Image (spheres, grey):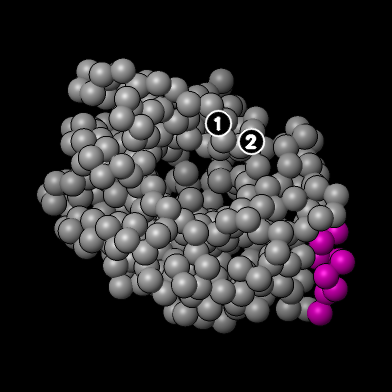
Amino acid sequence: MMTPWTDRRRRPLEDLRISVIDKCNFRCRYCMPEEAFRHHQFLKRDELLSFDEIERFVRIVAPHGVRKIRLTGGEPLLRPNLDELIRRLRTVTTIETIGLTTNGVYLERMAKVLKQAGLDRVNVSLDALSPETFGMMNGRGTSPEAVLRGIDEAKRQGLEVKVNMVVRKGWNDHEVAPMAAYFKERNITLRYIEFMDVGTANEWNVEHVVSSESILEVLKQRNGLLEPLAPESLGEVAQRYSYTDGAQVGFISSVSQPFCGTCTRGRLSSDGKWYTCLFAEDGTDIRELLRSGASDDLIAMTLKMVWEVRDDRYSEERTRTGNRTRNRIEMSYIGG
C-alpha cells in the first residue's frame, strides 16, 4: 500500500463508485423521469470505458487507500459480461469488498454468476411493495415481484443484501411501515434514503423530503424501541439502528443530516470522468488519458492532484444556506 491520498479536509479516498453504463430499464421519477429523458442520447458503446480501461484505472488508484469498489449505472446489470469485470477486479489484492447497486430486475438470473465471479454484496433499489406505487415510482409500471425474487436469490447465493428505499412525500411515504415489516421478517437491512436533489431533472423541493427522523418515529410506533449502532467504518453513509431481535434498519440523511465531513468516495462515470462529489458540476476526463498513451504515473498524478484539492461539501452548504442554484450532474450518469 502506497501513501493514501487525502483531500483538503483530510478525508481519505477509500471507496470507488464506478458507473459501467448510463442506460437503465427504469425511469424512476427521482432519477430518470421519463419526460426529461424521452429524447436523451445515451452513450455509444465506444464512448463507454472498456473493461481493460476500468481495470487499469482501478490498479492505478487502488494502492492509494482504496478498499471498496461499488459498481453502479444506470443499471449495471445491462452491461454485458459484467461478471468478467468483477472477476478481474477481484484480483486487485488491496480491494477488500466489491459491491453492486441494482434495481434487481435481472438479479434472479444473474446472482449466481456474479457471486462466483467474486461479488460480495448487492444494494437493491426498491421503493414500494405495492405494485401500483412501485410501478408509478419506476416509471415503467413494473411490478416488484421480479425484484423480490432477485433479492431472495441473491441471499440464497450468499451475497450480503441491503435494500434501498428512496422516500418522497406524497408518493411512497405510506410504504415506510410495510417495507420495514417485510424486510425485518427476512432479516434484510432496509435503508431509507431522503429524497435528494441529485441532478436537475427530478424537480426536487425540500417540501417533498421525508426526514429520517420522522421515519424513525413511525418505526418506533410500530415496532417499539430501536437502538442506534456505532459506525463500522469512516465514511459509512447510513446511520444504523437495531431492532430488539437483531435485525437492522438504516437511514441515509443527506438532506437533514449531511455527512460530507466523512465522505471518502470518488466516482468514475461510465465514459471516464473522475468526480469527487455526487453533486458535482463537472469531472476530470480520465478516458482521454487512458486512450492517449499516458503512463500510469501520469494518470496517478492527475487523480492525486484532483483529490488533494477536493473541498466538496455540497449537502452541508445546501442545508446551511438553502442554495442549490448550480448545475449538478445527473445521478443516472454518475451513479448513486
Reply yes or no: does residue 161 show up in magenta: no
- Magenta stretch: give its range: 293-302
In this rendering, position of residue 289 left or right of residue 81: right
Judging depth in this view, the residue of 125 and 29 nearest the camera is: 125
Image mark for residue 48: none
Residue furthest to the front: 245
Q: Which residue is mark 1?
A: 231
In the rendered image, is residue 302 in sight? no
Magenta segment, prevailing SS (helix, strand or loop): helix
> Is the residue marked by circle 1 packed among few (<14), some (14-19), or many (20+) residues within 10 Å?
few
- Residue at 53% across / 78% down in the picture? 84
In this rendering, position of residue 247 left or right of residue 291: left
- Check disc 1 and give the amino acid type: Pro
The image position of residue 301, as x and y in percent, is 85, 59
In the rendered image, is residue 80 in sight? yes
Judging depth in this view, the residue of 246 and 20 nearest the camera is: 246
Is there a contact, CB below 8 Å, between mark 2 and mark 1? Answer: yes
Instruction: Name the secondary structure under disc 2.
Output: loop
- Residue at 37% across / 68% down in the picture? 111
Q: Which residue is mark 2?
A: 234
